[in-house]
Image (cartoon, grey):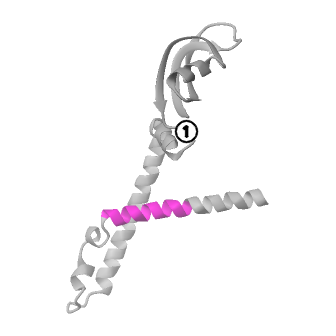
Amino acid sequence: MKTYEIRFTGRKVGAIGIFYPITAQVFADDAQAALMALYGRFEHITGAELKEIQSPFDGNGLVERVQNTQDEHRLIRLYVERLRDTIDAVAKRQTRDNQQWHDDQDAPDHGLWQSPSDQQFPRAERDKAILELVSRHLEVLNENEAAKEVA
């Protein structure tokens, strides 16, 4: 079963009045079946443009929807940028603490602890921290929702 997005001009079955632009999602085995499925809900279909899309019921489909919706995409981008700024600030504070704590010039690992924050905490590690934070927040949200349902 595939998911198709079909843009066309028409109206709902049984409606009276003008035809108008419609975008509908249809689940069908092939493009011809998708077009035929439209006639169960719409009539006077003209100018149909059909495109196979990701299913809205899987994660990739949801990501595609968010990326194509400016407001949601902007909010998520701001959230991720804020998380990145927070992680970067924590990495700099930790670097400063490491440099103060490990100030023994003769220690074999002295150079590691005195290096700048982007060497002590590479971008890949900071991004992993962001993913872990988001995963933990989702777990807490799910636990809270489950607790509300029980109550």
Report the span colored magenta. Answer: 123-137
Q: Mark 1 points at which residue?
A: 56
Image coords of residue 139 (percent x, y): 59, 62
Pick the residue in front: 14 or 17.
14
Image coords of residue 61 (percent x, y): 50, 40
**Crowding near the residue tagged with mark 1, few <14, some 14–19, many ≥20 C-alpha atoms within 10 Å:** some
**In which quarter of the view is residue 120 placed?**
bottom left
Identify the residue at the far right of this view. 151
Secondary structure at badge 1 equals loop
The chief SS type of the magenta part is helix
Q: Is residue 72 visible?
A: no
Task: Tell me the quarter of the image containing the N terminus.
Answer: top right
- Note whether 7 is above or below 132 in the view shown: above
Pick the residue in front: 141 or 78.
141
- Note whether 20 is above or below 2 in the view shown: above
Image coords of residue 9 (percent x, y): 54, 13
Residue found 25% across the figure and 80% down from its top: 112
Image coords of residue 21 (percent x, y): 54, 16
Residue found 52% across the figure and 46% down from its top: 59
